[in-house]
Image (cartoon, rainbow, N blue to C red):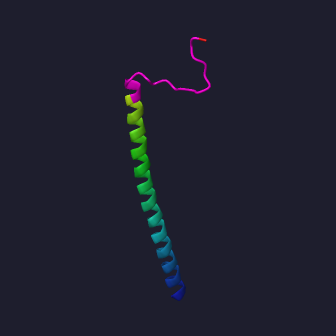
Amino acid sequence: MEKLEEQIAHLTHTLDELSDVIARQDTEIANLTQRVQMLMQREAAREAEGGGGIFLGDERPPHY
């Protein structure tokens, strides 16, 4: 009986730890989703302004 109680205590502790991990991951996923959405909106606004090209600093201008 004592062994079962130890196993239950261990499983309960593990379950609590996993629950904490899931809660942290949920928060992190929500933050990352918000950031991706913000970046997508920023890029859509940039494309709407006509500056959608990618600038490479070492690229020659087209008139060379």
Image quadrant assignment for residue 59:
top right
Q: How many marks?
A: 0
Classify 46 as above or below 16: above
Helix, strand or loop for the magenta stretch, by majority:
loop
The picture quadrant where one finds residue 63 is top right
Quarter of the image with the C terminus is: top right
- The percent position of residue 42, horizontal first and vertical second, equals 40, 34
Nearer to the camera, 20 or 50: 50
Q: Residue at x 37, y 30 (%)?
A: 45
Q: Position of residue 58 (x, y in %)?
A: 62, 25
Pick the residue in front: 54 or 6: 54
Is 49 part of what is drawn in magenta? yes
Furthest residue toward top: 63
Q: Position of residue 53 (x, y in %)?
A: 49, 23
Pick the front one: 24 or 50 = 50
Whether residue 22 is in magenta: the answer is no
Q: Magenta part of the protein: which range?
A: 46-63
Q: x and y percent of residue 13 in the render?
A: 48, 75
Q: Is 59 on the left or on the right of 44, as rendered?
A: right
**Rendered residue at 48%/66% (across/down):** 18
Name the residue: 45% across, 25% down.
52
Residue 59, above or below 64: below
